[in-house]
Amino acid sequence: MIGEPPKSIIHPTDLSFASQDAFAHALRIAVATQGDLHLVHIAEPAEDDPDDWNRFPHVREMLARWRMIEPGASRQEAAEKLGVKFIKASIESQSPVQGVAAYVHRHLCDLMVLMTHSRSGLERWLEDSVAEETVRETHMPALFLREDHKGFVDRDTGKLSLNTVLMPVEASVPPLDAFRHVADFAHALNPAADVMLLHVGEELPIFDGLLPHIELRQGPVIETILAYAGEIGADLIAMPTQGRRGLLDALRGTTTERVLHEAPCPVYAIPAK
């Protein structure tokens, strides 16, 4: 949803230890926004395993480690204390894209949190662009963490370090609604967070609506975005998108894919309204 922080977060999980950082981000965001957290595992019918339930991320164990609930607290006690609803679901589907998309639409999820890595359990997600195709199919905001990113949530303590967000803007993707959404998301986690805007080009386009200062830089788009992110110490890069015509266009080899693969921090893809 544009213009307000997410209230229904979905984290598709492959049940691996490598996805723990993405789980920690999904959980911490849900706590900060007092929303619903959906932990969803998609399995092909032949892959269904009763032990999968025991391998789901342990919500209360992590919350207790963060000292947000008492050790041994019940699910109901944790939910009542934090104002968060926790849902775990295992779904059989031949298509991960359709399985997640159907769940998202059925439960009105408004943020997807994904771990991207290419040599372990989520390999099929990357090789077939399943994660990206799911984001396109659902047309919803998505937070991508690479396997080598620790991100802005400390997995051991739950501490947040989201201080600076970089949002590149361009003329073909109206930025105002995306900026409002990104600002609301960032400020829900840290009221003092800065959202800094960047345009790469010869001159600054004219945008509708009131926006804060937009930094103007010249040079190759990818390299300039990444260099400026490093310069300001960005904790998150937010990329406004407009489906197949925006920065998330056909993610193989495009701007957002390269930023996602090379960024020093997590990447947040936010569809333009």
Image (cartoon, helix red, strand yellow):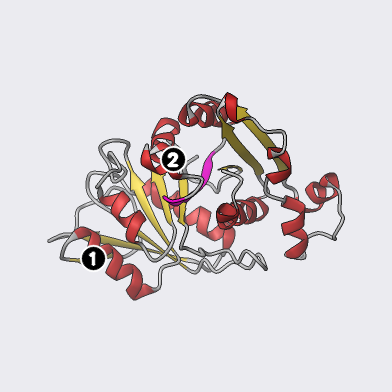
Secondary structure, mark 1, is helix
Q: Quadrant of the C terminus?
A: top left
Disc 1 to disc 2, how far (Cα)? 28 Å
Residue range (magenta)? 110-119
Q: Which residue corresponds to the image point at 35% horizontal and 48% vertical from the top-left? A: 240
Secondary structure, mark 2, is helix
Rendered location of residue 94, percent (x, y): 50, 24
How many numbered circles does the render carry? 2
Question: Is residue 117 shown in magenta?
Answer: yes
> Is residue 180 in sight in this rendering?
yes
Q: Is residue 184 above or below residue 65?
A: above
| Residue nearest the viewer, comparing 189 with 151 | 151
Q: Give the mark nearer the N terminus: 1 vs 2.
A: 2
Q: Which residue corresponds to the image point at 45% horizontal and 32% vertical from the top-left? A: 138
Q: Which residue corresponds to the image point at 85% horizontal and 60% vertical from the top-left? A: 71
| Residue nearest the viewer, comparing 138 with 95 | 95
In the image: residue 133, left or right of residue 9: left
Which labelled disc corresponds to residue 143? none
**Residue 32 occupies which quadrant of the picture?**
bottom right
Rendered location of residue 169, percent (x, y): 28, 54
- Residue type for callout 1: Thr
> Is residue 272 in sight in this rendering?
no
Q: Is residue 10 above or below residue 68?
A: above
Could you classify mark 2 by the number of other residues whose Cα lies within 10 Å: few (under 14), some (14-19), or many (20 or more)?
Answer: many
- Residue type for callout 2: Trp
Q: Which residue corresponds to the image point at 84% horizontal and 44% vertical from the top-left? A: 76
Q: Are marks 1 and 2 in contact (CB under 8 Å)?
A: no
Residue marked by disc 2: 125
**Residue 198 occupies which quadrant of the picture?**
bottom left
| Residue nearest the viewer, comparing 15 with 250 | 15
Residue marked by disc 1: 224
